[in-house]
Image (cartoon, rainbow, N blue to C red):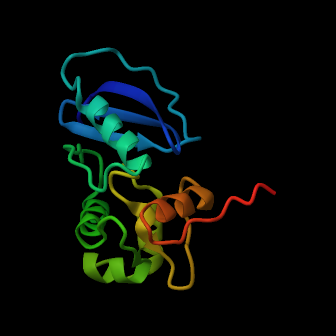
Amino acid sequence: MALVVEALSVDTAIGVVDIEASDAGVRRVRLPGERAHTRYAPSEGGAGAAAEAGEQIRQYASGEREAFDVTLDWSGVEATHRRALETLCEIAPYGVTVTYGELGKQASVEDPREIGVLMATNPLPLVVPCHRVVASDGLGGFGGGLELKQRLLELEGVLPARLDLGL
């Protein structure tokens, strides 16, 4: 497993996002409210990977970016989990959703509930867009909470933006 060499917090339009990178690439993204509790020794090995991901996440959250172009560190991610996450990236680009069952079929995971568990434990949310996986009868769940999932799908135009009536 690669060593975490860079960690930072980025203030975005959706809240503070924490990013960790190793010398192999971005290895962890923590959504607003999911705070890191680990200290990291500064190192030059991965300097820049977390910062680049942070800037791209900031742009995405502001509606200025639709796709991420960062190297990912998949060390520590089990093979089936990685296959499901990589399949998600292939079949659900910006503005497109997929059901748990559809993703399972494409990723050769038979049980849609297993896909739900794999999405709930996605170490790279936003960059690997697990918020685009929905239930056949609604939004389904999301590690960052349903409010954030709805905001992200509104940002991408999947759901209509809610009116702020100031009530």
Q: Residue at x 44, y 31 (%)?
A: 10
| Image spot of residue 15 (x, y percent) | 54, 40
Residue visible at 54% across and 35% down in the picture: 35
Residue at the right extreme of this rendering: 167
Q: Is residue 58 above or below residue 10?
A: below
User: Which residue is pictured at 27% across the width and 64% down the height?
Assistant: 89
Residue 112's quadrant in the figure?
bottom left
Residue 150: quadrant of the picture: bottom right
Image quadrant holding the C terminus, namely: bottom right
Quadrant where the N terminus is found in the figure: top left
Residue 55 placed where, x, y %?
33, 35
Asked if residue 142 shows in the view, the reply is no
Image side of residue 28 versus residue 86, left or right? right
Q: Between residues 150 and 101, which one lies in front from this camera angle?
A: 150
Query: Can residue 44 be spotted in the picture?
Result: yes
3 left or right, relative to 60: left
Image: 78 above or below 76:
below
| Residue beneath the point at 50% across and 42% down | 13
Q: Tell me residue 100's x, y (percent).
A: 43, 77
For the residue pair 67 and 28, the one nearer the viewer reads as 67
Q: Nearer the viewer, residue 51 or 101?
A: 51
Q: Position of residue 132 (x, y in %)?
A: 42, 67
